[in-house]
Amino acid sequence: MRLSEISQKEIIDYHKGERLGVLGQTDLMIDEKSGQIEAFVIPTLKWFGLGKREKEVTVYWNQIKKIGADMIIIEVPH
């Protein structure tokens, strides 16, 4: 799967049912040898995106449960 095929999709936490971000507003961890995406690093912002970065959530490729037309469903340990 190419990055262009999954960019601009919403990232949704399966357990909480909440939106974590949009792919494209995240950082990616990429394997330097293979060029494959290893993980998404999603910033958690306060004040509706105008404040400082509080923390980051790292979502590894194996935590993705489903990639749909508009969103990516993930399952992260809490």
Image: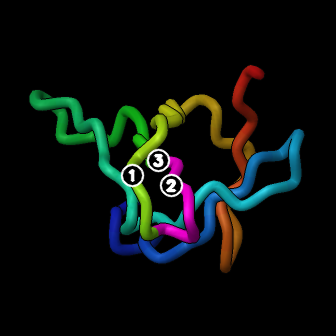
Left or right for 1, reference 27: right
Lower position in the chain sequence, tag 1 or tag 2: 2
- Region rendered in magenta: 44-49
Which residue is rendered at x = 11% and y = 31% of the image? Answer: 32
As drawn, which residue projects farthest toward the top? 77
* 46 vs 57, nearest the viewer: 46
Amino acid under label 3? Ile
Task: Say which amino acid is labelled 1.
Answer: Lys
For numbered disc 1, what is the local secondary structure?
loop
Looking at the rendered structure, the kind of residue marked 2 is Leu
Disc 3 designates what residue? 42
In the image, residue 38 lies at what x, y percent?
Answer: 37, 33
Q: Which residue is mark 2?
A: 45
Q: The N terminus lies in which quarter of the figure? A: bottom left
Tell me the chief SS of the magenta region.
loop
Q: Is residue 34 left or right of residue 17?
A: left
Task: Label 3, secondary structure: give it.
Answer: strand
Q: Which residue is mark 1?
A: 52
Q: Earlier in the sequence, mark 3 or mark 1?
A: 3
- Across and down, in percent, residue 11 comes to 63, 59
Against 15, residue 18 (above or below) is below
Q: Are marks 1 and 2 in contact (CB under 8 Å)?
A: yes
